[in-house]
Image: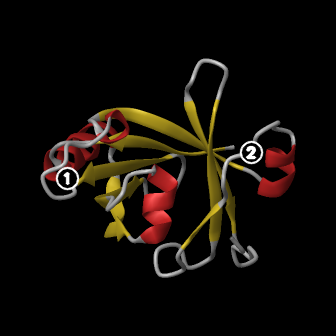
């Protein structure tokens, strides 16, 4: 099941206004993502981004807006440039999905203050290099690694 689409944006307020007017989406979360878990997930040392999740009142596929803040004077890598960056799929068992891969990526647990029900996730690339987020929600074990 499609969970969300991630779009890196240059101006969060402008993007929120656009998606609100076009699709009737409204913010359901607005917070800063940073720390070791976020650096591990993005592969960007010192990664820090404003994350705004947009949704409709009746739910559906959400739009996740990320506005990266440059770490000091270092330029951001292409992953943090504005544009469509990945789509996320909800899975029932992340470990089972990853076991099918010859070289599985690291699993990252999102801190509970960000996703209170718990979320484990990993980024994989399809044969053409498209980033796919595999997301397992709720009742997840603590990440050990």
Give coordinates of residue 131: x percent, y percent. 55, 34
Q: Quadrant of residue 112?
A: bottom right
Q: Which mark is residue 70?
A: 1
Q: What crowding class fits label 2: few (fewer than 14 Cα within 10 Å), some (14-19), or many (20 or more)?
A: some
Residue 129 vertical position relative to residue 92 in the rendered view, above or below: above
User: Is 77 or 10 nearer to us in this picture?
Assistant: 77
Instruction: Give yes or no for contact between labels 2 and 1 (Cβ–Cβ under 8 Å).
Output: no
Q: Quadrant of residue 29?
A: bottom left
Q: Residue furthest top?
A: 128
- Examine the rendering and report whether any part of residue 93 can be seen: no
User: Is 25 or 81 nearer to us in this picture?
Assistant: 81
Q: Which residue is mark 2?
A: 104
Q: Assign the N terminus to one quadrant of the image.
A: top right
**Cα separation between marks 2 and 1:** 29 Å
Give coordinates of residue 133: x percent, y percent. 60, 45
Secondary element at image label 1: loop
- Residue at point 87% right, 51% down? 96
* 77 sits left or right of 130 in the view: left
- Residue at point 33% right, 58% down? 47
Give coordinates of residue 21: x percent, y percent. 23, 42
Secondary element at image label 2: loop
Q: Assign the C terminus to one quadrant of the image.
A: bottom right
* 128 sits left or right of 5 in the view: right
* 104 sits left or right of 10 in the view: right
User: Is 94 or 26 nearer to us in this picture?
Assistant: 94
Q: Earlier in the sequence, mark 2 or mark 1?
A: 1
Residue 95 vertical position relative to residue 142 in the rendered view, above or below: above
Q: Which mark is residue 39?
A: none
Q: What crowding class fits label 1: few (fewer than 14 Cα within 10 Å), some (14-19), or many (20 or more)?
A: some
- Residue at point 69% right, 73% down? 143
């Amino acid at each position: 099941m499609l969970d969300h689409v991630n779009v890196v944006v240059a101006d969060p307020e402008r993007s929120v206004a656009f998606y609100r007017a076009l699709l009737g989406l409204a913010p359901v979360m607005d917070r800063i993502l940073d720390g070791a878990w976020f650096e591990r997930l993005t592969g960007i040392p010192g990664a820090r981004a404003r994350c705004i999740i947009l949704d409709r009142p009746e739910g559906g596929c959400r739009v996740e807006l990320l506005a990266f803040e440059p770490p000091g004077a270092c330029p951001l890598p292409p992953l943090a440039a504005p544009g469509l960056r990945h789509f996320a799929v909800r899975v029932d068992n992340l470990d089972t999905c990853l076991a099918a891969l010859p070289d599985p990526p690291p699993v990252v647990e999102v801190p509970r203050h960000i996703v209170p029900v718990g979320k484990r996730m990993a980024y994989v690339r399809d044969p053409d290099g498209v980033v796919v987020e595999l997301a397992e929600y709720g009742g997840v074990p603590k990440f050990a690694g």
